[in-house]
Amino acid sequence: MSRKRKDVQNELSKKLSDMRAIMGKPEEQEKLRTMQAEVESLTEELNRINIDEAAERAIANSMLSDDVKETARKFSFAKFFRELSSKEGLTGVELEMSQLAKQECERSGIALKGTGIPVCVLNYSRAFAGMTAGTQTDGGYTIATSLRYQEELRKRLVLASAGAQYVGGLTGNITIIDGKHITANWEGENTTASDVKKTFTTRELKPKRLAVNVPISKQLIIQSSWDVEQMIISDILNAHAEALETAAINGSGEGQPTGILNTSGIGSVVIGENGGAVTFGKMVDLETAISIRNADLGSLAYLTNSKVRGALKQTLRSQGGSGYIWENGEVNGYKAYASNIIPSDIKKGTGTNLNAALFANFNDLLICQWGGLDVISDPYTLKKEGAIEITMNAYHDVFVRRAESFAAIKDIAV
């Protein structure tokens, strides 16, 4: 049974007070290290409570009357895009839902750039008929099983398959606590022990606008078939998943989330001054980079791109031995995944077109979404191709809970 925020905060405050009382006492170093582990555990518990409370707020905000749910079920994506690209504007159910989306965005502090599609449509629209909302099996946070768009999106994310936790339907910012490690030092018998302090900083998960462009055939949106609705949704989901995964892996942190490869403090394994061929030993070194920091727990997996996967499938674990580095979807007994979002154009020294590979506890990656979708229709740019261009704004953030849980090679030559 999860504890209340106040109880955890009180215990954390007392533990920190106890730590301060024994700092500078050499004979208490072992006790200090034990308390450090307890403080880190309490900090992690408090962060989980923050996320759980955000999830509960999302559930509360998604509680709708049966009438609203029934209206959302009648929503047509094809009609929505068709009317959005016309001069007449929205009518009927689609107009009603856009008004609901505006209210939803106001609650979340999001300024609509175009016309909104609310979360309830993503939950209940018949466009998802035939799309089976699966059950999350990696132990992550799922707001509700009825959040079909988010569930379908999660299933298309390689990172989620590897264990990343997808949190959808959020409102408001989420405060996350970072606690820096305490170090213990051996001191001379008659020297004064140096004070050791544990410092805390906070980070906020907050919505950042992700713009995804999707071309949709004009011939397609004039159809009224629910199969067409599913085709449209599938195109949007695929584009959304690719853009979101790109940010989670490669995000620069400037106006967008900070992706794994740009997160300060992750483990690093180097092949050579100008890069070089990957070996079984270097892949195992990624595991070591995590395990020496006591982070080799949870949903551990490898992730790289198709080029490196191909090379690993053809490279023996040892010279003259049998067995390839990548076999049966695994590397050294751990699940292995490939995504071409993992970069293959890295430069180092004289090396070019170098590749990256990751080993991580992907449970320590959170992918968060606020609200529904914000849509802008452009009927002109692709008019010669007989298509409209839909710019779909979604609001996300990505959070690496522990940098120690991730390690990367960034100089693989293939």
Image (cartoon, rainbow, N blue to C red):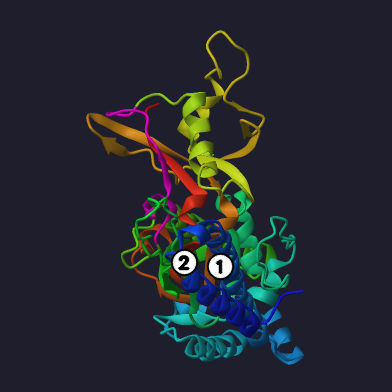
Compared across the picture, whether 13 is left or right of 211 comes to right
Q: Secondary structure at mark 1?
A: helix
The reply to whether residue 182 is in sight is yes
Residue of label 2: 179
| Few, some or many residues within 10 Å of mark 2 (<14, 14–19, 20+) | some
When asked about the image quadrant of residue 389, the answer is: bottom left
Question: Do labels 2 and 1 touch, CB within 8 Å?
Answer: yes
Question: Looking at the image, which is closer to me, 329 or 79?
Answer: 329
Coordinates of residue 59 in the picture (x, y in percent): 67, 81
Vertical arrangement, residue 343 with respect to residue 8, above or below: above
Specify the quadrant that holds the C terminus.
top left
- How many residues crowd around disc 1 within 10 Å: few (fewer than 14), some, or many (20 or more)? many
Q: Nearer the viewer, mark 2 or mark 1?
A: 1
Q: Is residue 61 above or below residue 42?
A: below
Answer above or below: position of 239 versus 21. Answer: above
What residue is shown with label 1? Answer: 39
Q: Which quarter of the picture shows residue 97? A: bottom right
Q: Is residue 292 above or below residue 252?
A: above
Q: Which residues are magenta?
A: 258-275
On residue 18, the disc is: none
Quadrant for the N terminus, please. Answer: bottom right
Give the residue at x 48% y 40%: 289
Going by the numbered disc 2, the residue's amino acid type is: Gly
Extreme-left residue of the structure: 350
- Predominant SS of the magenta segment: loop
Point 50% across, 25% down: residue: 281
**Residue at mark 2 to residue at mark 1: CA–CA distance:** 9 Å
> At 28% from the left edge and 32% from the top edge, which residue is drawn?
352
Name the amino acid, label 1: Val
> Which mark is first along the chain, 1 or 2?
1
- Total residue callouts: 2
